[in-house]
């Protein structure tokens, strides 16, 4: 089985690419980073440092690489059985025209073998969004062929992969935590379901998408935003601060109450899941910077993301949300000279004030109690 993976960064190499290669798939990475491409093609292998309770160094072997720009990657799209991505939500739209060209070539070559595409991104139903971008780049006739032969499979992914600090300056070395979770919607595949260890098939993906979004993502972001306000550099330092931890745990419990109402999760099992995630944040081997985790605050404050979506759930079910509100207020104070969204948020707050800025970014009702509470919390921090 041949696979093409877009994104040879830390998440691509340390998580999805590793699972595919470990499963024995013939794997090619596609990326724009020539240093990484050259290293992969010179060695056809790299090391992954797995850190946590059981530390180990795994070698990923038999991999190749190709530029994600140009004819070579288009030719591969026309041949492979599986395409995955770990490029970041913003980049999905940029790779769609290349995917469209490859699918056009696949059709021209009369390759009717099933192809499945899985976007493994930190977003809700990312593959469905990628599908719409690809559709826009194709004719109606070509799209009809794609609908028949190509599965666009949504997934939920969870593994903390911080930026590597290789002592050897190896561009391929990557560090990951022990925990990983890759859950895919088995109802969306074309052809036979793949057997890839580490890939979990489900027919109720949204329950797991929201469990991860409302717990890991919500907690991670709030830890970063409160940690930055408290002067901490890393997620570990922040979560070991009792004041930060109390709000983070409280927010995850509030969002968890939504999940229990919505999907029927068992309360004791979800409490154990929250405890496990807090333990992951404490991992002493992961040097994860609060500024990195907090970046793109406009996206993280949007209606469908990790802060506002669980808040909307608490409003829907009439549940408490005091800690989620504190997290949203902290996010509005996030600052980073390296992050364009942080700069944009800062300007929006300066131009319009906290109420109008939050309403514009989140889509919340300007006259809602939630907005009033968030503005009050924001001003209290200021």
Image (spheres, rainbow, N blue to C red):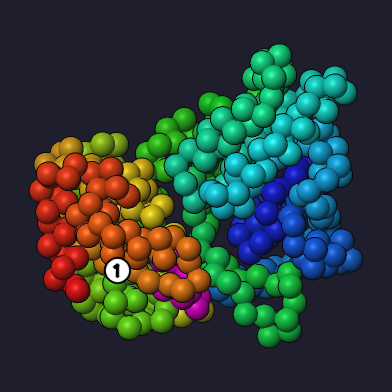
Quarter location, residue 13: bottom right
As drawn, which residue projects farthest toward the front? 351
Near mark 1 (Cα within 10 A), the count class, few <14, some 14-19 or many ≥20, is many
The reply to whether residue 286 is visible in this rendering is: yes
| Residue 352 sits above or below residue 225 on the image | above
Residue 300, given in percent of the width and then of the height, sits at: 38, 54
Residue 88, given in percent of the width and then of the height, sits at: 56, 53
Residue at 61% over, 74% down: 164
The residue wearing badge 1 is 333
Nearest the viewer among 278 and 236 is 236
Q: Where is the C terminus found, in terms of image quarters?
A: bottom left
Nearest the viewer among 336 and 346 is 346
What are the residue bounds of the magenta stretch?
286-295
| Residue 4 sits above or below residue 130 on the image | below
Residue at 29% over, 36% down: 263
Residue at 77% over, 32% down: 101
Quarter location, residue 204: top left
Residue at 32% over, 59% down: 348
Nearest the viewer among 306 and 349 is 349
Q: Is residue 292 magenta?
A: yes
Q: Is residue 304 magenta?
A: no
Residue 149, given in percent of the width and then of the height, sits at: 70, 21
Helix, strand or loop at mark 1: loop
The reply to whether residue 319 is visible in this rendering is: no
Q: Where is the N terminus found, in terms of image quarters?
A: top right
| Residue 116 sits above or below residue 68 on the image | above
Residue 102, given in percent of the width and then of the height, sits at: 78, 33
């Amino acid at each position: 089985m041949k696979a093409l993976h877009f994104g040879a960064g830390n998440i691509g190499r340390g998580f999805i690419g590793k699972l595919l290669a470990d499963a024995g798939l013939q794997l090619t990475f596609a990326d724009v980073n020539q240093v990484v491409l050259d290293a992969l093609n010179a060695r056809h292998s790299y090391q992954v440092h797995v850190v946590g309770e059981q530390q180990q160094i795994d070698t990923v072997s038999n991999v190749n690489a190709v530029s994600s720009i140009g004819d070579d990657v288009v030719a591969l799209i026309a041949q492979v059985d599986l395409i995955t991505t770990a490029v970041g939500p913003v980049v999905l739209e940029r790779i769609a025209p290349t995917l469209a060209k490859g699918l056009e070539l696949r059709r021209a070559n009369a390759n009717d073998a099933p192809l499945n595409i899985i976007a493994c991104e930190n977003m809700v139903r990312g593959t469905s969004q990628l599908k719409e971008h690809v559709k826009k780049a194709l004719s109606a006739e070509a799209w009809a062929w794609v609908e028949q032969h190509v599965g666009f499979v949504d997934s939920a992914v969870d593994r903390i992969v911080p930026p590597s600090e290789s002592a050897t300056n190896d561009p391929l070395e990557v560090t990951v935590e022990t925990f990983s979770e890759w859950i895919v919607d088995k109802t969306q595949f074309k052809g036979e379901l793949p057997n890839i260890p580490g890939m979990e098939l489900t027919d109720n993906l949204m329950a797991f998408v929201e469990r991860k979004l409302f717990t890991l993502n919500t907690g991670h972001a709030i830890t970063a935003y409160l940690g930055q306000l408290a002067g901490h550099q890393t997620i570990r330092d922040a979560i070991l601060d009792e004041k930060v931890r109390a709000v983070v745990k409280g927010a995850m419990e509030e969002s968890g109450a939504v999940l229990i109402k919505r999907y029927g999760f068992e309360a004791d099992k979800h409490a154990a899941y929250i405890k496990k995630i807090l333990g992951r944040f404490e991992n002493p081997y992961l040097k994860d910077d609060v500024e990195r985790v907090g970046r793109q605050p406009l996206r993280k404050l949007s209606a469908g993301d990790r802060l506002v979506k669980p808040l909307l759930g608490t409003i829907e079910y009439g549940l408490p949300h005091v800690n989620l509100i504190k997290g949203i207020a902290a996010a509005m104070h996030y600052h980073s000279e390296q992050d364009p969204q942080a700069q944009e948020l800062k300007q929006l707050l300066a131009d319009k004030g906290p109420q109008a800025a939050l309403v514009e970014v989140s889509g919340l009702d300007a006259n809602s109690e939630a907005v009033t509470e968030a503005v009050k919390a924001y001003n209290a921090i200021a």
